[in-house]
Image (cartoon, rainbow, N blue to C red):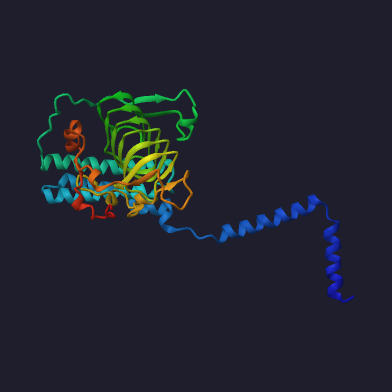
């Protein structure tokens, strides 16, 4: 027997003599050493480092606020609006890797700049106040704390719990989310309502809405839709998840395709609206052009055409908000784009 063969035989005998526990311990030790080496060699993306974010973002809101105080022309105001929107977009883009404390702090700073720009605009470009149409209800009330006492299966799907500000059990009203609320908002059991969320959010949940319209600006995290029927939603979430929803239209700008499950007769189209002249891709740089039509259906894995959703027909595209909410939309400077302008940053609807 050669020396090499003898060494191999000795190694085999030694391995056989080891107990199962010893072999597992040795394997675990080797695995931990491998993981430690991988962590040590891992490179960190500088663009997703909170320290780098604050190095670039810190103090920017103060600069915008000071410029707003000194502004004296309409052109300056328009530029300031763009700069404030850029700050909000930076916060939205960084939400994926910032801590909750950092998100809250950055959002507060961006809001400070936005409010300063609004004050400058009111001072330099005053506009006539819109009167509400007869019969229109504009709700401006304190935060309604929604307590979820039950833990039904349908609620667990959207991970709702605790207390979240929002509206529920309302019929036929025009509702506006208040900027002083939490960045997590919940709408539940609404019928024939029009809801505006004109401020950046972290999460939006829509549960059991019937024949409602919801207009939302950028949502840094997910938007959950559950058990809605006959609605029209315009949202800019990082991700859109839809469950048990029928006969509903979604105008979407997002980072990835919408996800649907147990849905029917859902229609999808581009977001196609502006707030104060700002488009979706300017509000949230995470928006991927055309992602709205990349719908993923967990209940339809076949290669044939999916019967549960379709792209919105051009003849069904609405260019105006519901009449009872027109004055509120004007006050929020919300404009639905005509079909001719859908080429601005969007994939044209077929």
Q: Where is residue 77 in the image (x, y as percent from the top left)?
A: 16, 48
Residue drawn where x is 50% and y is 30% of the image: 153
Residue 202 in view: no
Q: Residue at x 17, y 38 (%)?
A: 330
How many numbered circles are shown? 0
**x and y percentages locating residue 150 in the rendered image:** 48, 24
Residue drawn at (72%, 55%) of the image:
27
Residue beneath the point at 20% across and 44% down: 276
Residue 80 versus residue 187: which sits nearer the camera? 187
| Nearer to the camera, 96 or 174 | 174
Q: In the picture, which quadrant includes the N terminus? A: bottom right
Left or right, residue 166 beside residue 154 = left
Q: Which of 86 and 341 is in front in this view?
A: 341
Query: In the rendered view, does 220 fall on the left or right side of 28?
Result: left
User: Could you tell me residue 204's position as x and y percent?
Assistant: 37, 37
Q: Which of 271 and 199 is in front in this view?
A: 271
């Amino acid at each position: 027997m050669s020396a090499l063969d003898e060494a191999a035989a000795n190694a085999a005998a030694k391995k056989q003599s080891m107990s199962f526990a010893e072999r597992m311990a040795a394997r675990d030790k080797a695995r931990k050493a491998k993981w430690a080496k991988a962590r040590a060699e891992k490179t960190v993306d500088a663009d997703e480092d909170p320290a780098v974010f604050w190095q670039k973002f810190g103090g920017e809101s103060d600069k915008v606020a000071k410029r707003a105080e000194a502004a004296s022309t309409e052109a300056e105001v328009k530029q300031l609006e763009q700069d404030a929107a850029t700050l909000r977009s930076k916060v939205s883009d960084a939400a994926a890797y910032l801590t909750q404390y950092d998100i809250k702090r950055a959002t507060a700073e961006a809001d400070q700049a936005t409010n300063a720009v609004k004050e400058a605009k009111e001072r330099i470009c005053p506009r006539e106040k819109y009167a509400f149409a007869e019969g229109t209800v504009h709700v401006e009330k304190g935060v309604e704390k929604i307590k979820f006492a039950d833990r039904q299966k349908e609620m667990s799907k959207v991970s709702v719990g605790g207390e979240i500000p929002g509206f529920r059990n309302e019929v036929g009203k025009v509702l506006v989310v208040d900027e002083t609320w939490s960045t997590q908002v919940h709408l539940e059991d609404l019928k024939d309502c029009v809801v505006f969320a004109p401020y950046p959010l972290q999460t939006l949940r829509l549960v059991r809405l019937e024949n409602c319209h919801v207009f939302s600006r950028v949502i840094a995290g997910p938007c959950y839709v559950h058990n809605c029927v006959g609605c029209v939603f315009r949202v800019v979430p990082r991700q859109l998840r839809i469950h048990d929803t029928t006969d509903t239209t979604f105008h979407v700008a997002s980072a990835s395709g919408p996800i649907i499950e147990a849905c029917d007769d859902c229609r999808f189209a581009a977001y196609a609206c502006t707030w104060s002249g700002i488009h979706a891709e300017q509000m949230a740089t995470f928006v991927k052009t055309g992602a709205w039509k990349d719908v993923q259906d967990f209940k339809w894995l076949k290669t044939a055409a999916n019967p549960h959703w379709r792209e919105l027909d051009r003849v069904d595209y609405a260019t105006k908000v519901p009449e009872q909410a027109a004055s509120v939309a004007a006050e929020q400077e919300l404009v639905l784009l005509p079909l001719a302008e859908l080429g601005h940053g969007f994939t044209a609807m077929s």
